[in-house]
Image (cartoon, rainbow, N blue to C red):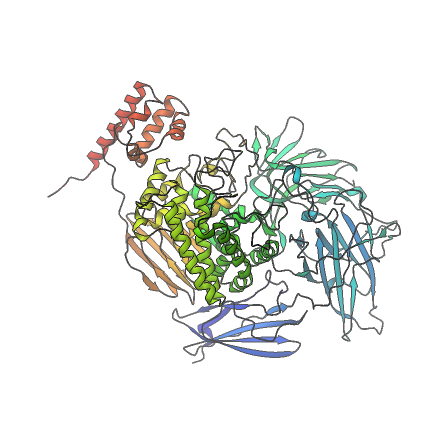
Amino acid sequence: MTDRSAVCVVRVDIDAPAPCLPVASPRPRVGWRVEAREPAWRQEHAEVRWVVAGRTRYARIAGESRFRIAWPFAALEPRETGALSVRVVGVDGSVSAWSDPVRVVAGFLADDEWHAEWIGHPAPQAHAQPALLRCEFDLPDRGSDAPAVVRALLYASAVGGYRAAVNGRDVADHVLAPGWTPYSSRTVHDTVEVTPLVRAGRNCLSLRVAGLWATEHFGFRQNARPRYGDQPRVAAQLLLEFADGSRRWVRTGPSWTASTGALLASGLYAGETYDARAQPVDAAGREWDEPGFDDGSWAPARVYPRETIPGPRVSPPVRRIEQRHPVARIATDDGATILDFGQNLVGRLRLRVAGPRGTRITLRHAEVLEHGRLGTRPLRRAAATDRYTLAGTGTEVWEPEFTFHGFRYAEVSGWPGEIPEGAVTAVVVHSDLERTGSFRTSHPLLQRLHDNVVWSLRGNFLSIPTDCPQRDERLGWTGDIQVFAPTAAFLYDVRGLLDSWLRDLALEQAADGTVPFVVPDVIGIARPAAAWGDAAVIVPDVLERLLGDADTVRRQYPSAKAWVDRCLELAGPTRVWEGGFQFGDWLDPTAPPDRPAQAMTSTGLVATAQLARSARVLARAAALCGESADAVAYAAVAEEVTAAFVREFVTPAGRLMSDTPTAYALALVFELLPEELRRAAGDRLADLVRENGYRIATGFVGTPLVLDALTMTGHDAQAARLLLQTRCPSWLYPVTMGATTIWERWDSMLPDGSINPGDMTSFNHYALGAVADWMHRVLAGMTALEPGYRRIRIAPHPLVGIDDAAVTYASPFGQIEVGWRRDGARVVVEAVLPTGVEALVRLPGASADVVVGTGTYRWEVVVAEPPVPASVSLDSALAEIIDDADALAVVVDALDAHRPGAADAMFAATRWTRGQTLAEVVFQYASPAVQAQIGGRLASLSASRQSAAPPSGD
């Protein structure tokens, strides 16, 4: 049988920073996606075709593997270019057609090929002076006998940010290139083909450069200072390949000329100042980046000491991703206009303006409004202000180039006349990641919460994974990405970005194994901190478990091992890690605004739990790396730390010494408790969540785990109430306050619309959005059991109060779809599994799994309705009232009608326990008359329930 229509290779994947970009490795991983007509189709082998320089080679890949396959040919040479195609053969004899060829370009240099010198402004007049740099070169005229250029490749890097142009045209659509790495130990070059831009005769290669991350004053308060020097510098080399096989390099060096241009000042935090009148144009009207420009007044570029030799780009570039227009405008008393873009985003503004020469427009940015004005206090010393002075030459278009801001609102002042519609556009910028996962529900607040998670990821995955994008920080905090990595890896293909960041983590790691708080480490503090330093172990594990990236685990293994060994050294022979600095359950809601580490949960308990988990994950990594002795040793260490955790922090009855939701969530999700204590711990967690009125009582460490801990111990009802709570603190409180991203604090904005008084208040922080991982896996019901989602678990949890939930995921095998919806008393579960994916299905209420393969499925199950609550009265226990939504509504409505805010006051002060009645609490907030009213309404509610109940039978 040779039926080519039975199966088709629909996509070929190459391990590159982004589709169509040069690969960074001589042996890039490859994969392919298949669609088959028959659900039972299986791959017997695949054939890979590699065409390069007119020669064709073939490789045969036996078996079903088609995901992150080792490069099956000789290692690529620098600049080698070819076309890769794949066809597959089924066990039934079916053969696909060859896939469309994918162009592969080797973007790396040979070991001895980087000789560009690092250059910059010859006489900077200020810190982080932006500069223009240029050189001209000649190519043979078309009529000459000299060989023509057949290919031109530009390799460029910067300690700072750069844009390159050839003959006045930018070579790429990347922005903020090359991105942020720890420049003193690692720099990155871009590789761009510029053949269409060069021409016979005179050519100009030009570079625009500014400080960006390289010259920013990083650090807190009086410790802020530049970490990589005071001035930006850039290096580039253009390779010209000729038809006769010869080649020529054009490299940066002392022969280049430099000057200041229209960009007068640029800062990551400060913003940009641009005077269009100062744009260099010579007497003949030629722009500075065009061939023939008279640069006689320019000075030779300054040559800086050599930097680390740049390596090829691994992470996807930053690009302009989207444009958004204002949805509203507000006129201020001083004549400015505040534009509302309807979404807290990261990027900058693009202006389209005409006006008199010398007119100066000022743009200020903020995430929120406070009392009708920009809420800039949370920005701290980040001015986030751009200034543009018009040249007066007609319609002018300008967008800042070497900065970005986190904002929803922008104040525009100095505009000549009224601001026309469409004259100001918000340009969204971030790393150009491929979207892979989605979540949808008809619950509007829950959907907005998930949308906010996505927007916070977009705003903070900009070159590196950062904590926030707006204030004087924007750092690669290890704790944030440690908890958020599973969410990120579902929503986007973050493999390249996190692979690059992990390389930097290993470089910045201390000799004793200590992982710094931030990577790159620019705050000058590095102490071992649980849940933060654990990123060295957890993030590579996430990349392997979800995305199949075992290569990163192998490369990072020494780093992960060094971290765990350092923690074990600190824990000592007791295996209990306590004492010394810890962030703990950072931003626990009970922590005062100015003391975010003052959490309810013991830092020793948190640190020991994290150590047990990391040791267990490291044992898995050791086995993956073939380090069998280490695998056995660290598995044993994990058991020792687990036993120490139980010995030190758990009572024989299953209570934890820190009687907090975070403590129980850690113990349950990290599997630290003996099996006989898990039920008691789960019940106690449910009690604590109820007693707190189903409001959040966890910080950075506990929040990603608490819903998992509830649902895995059978407390779905409590999980639903916690998830859907709208009172502060909760996931949905910010949504009710108009949030369009995840906040750093549960109460970054207070109910009265004022900003939290703490010095650390961001409105765009993804860490607390790690709940989305639970929404994908548990609520919608799709969990990866094998890398790449080759094998998954389908186990949805149709929680009370939610009518439906669904996820899709673009796996390496094709699109997977899983979801459920209510249909009367039934719940309908649906799934679509692409070719090569298998699922273990556990339907709601079922006690066993069903195994299914490729195909489209629909199941219906009857889900028992929650029991009707018993009669309620003022004598009912507080626990019964908080669990009875209708009864609680009676109390809240009566209190708020009596005195606005009374219900909030009661919630803030009440523990909803079984041992106290409603009457014992409500008298503090209501008069006798209102208490009687509440009692009467509860009696009416009870009577209506009794009348509606079906008659009992024999």
Q: What residue occupies the far left of the structure in this picture?
A: 954
Is residue 503 positioned above or below 61 on the image?
above
Q: Position of residue 175 (x, y in %)?
A: 66, 52
Left or right: 500 as drawn, with respect to 234:
left
Left or right: 141 as drawn, with respect to 700:
right
Q: Position of residue 44 (x, y in %)?
A: 44, 76
Is residue 906 positioned above or below 627 on the image?
above
Q: Is residue 447 visible?
A: no
Q: Position of residue 545 (x, y in %)?
A: 46, 60
Quadrant of image for the C terminus: top left
**Residue nearest the observer in this picture, 620 or 498:** 620
**Residue nearest the observer in this picture, 484 or 192:** 484
Residue under the image location 30 percent in, 18 percent down: 929
Quadrant of image for the N terminus: bottom left
Is residue 794 positioned above or below 54 on the image?
above
Left or right: 40 as drawn, with respect to 846:
right
Image quadrant in which you'd find residue 250: bottom right
**Residue nearest the observer in this picture, 131 or 483:** 483
Image quadrant in which you'd find residue 920: top left
Q: Position of residue 394 (x, y in %)?
A: 76, 42
Q: What residue occupies the far bottom of the structure in this picture?
A: 1
Is residue 378 positioned above or below 495 on the image?
above
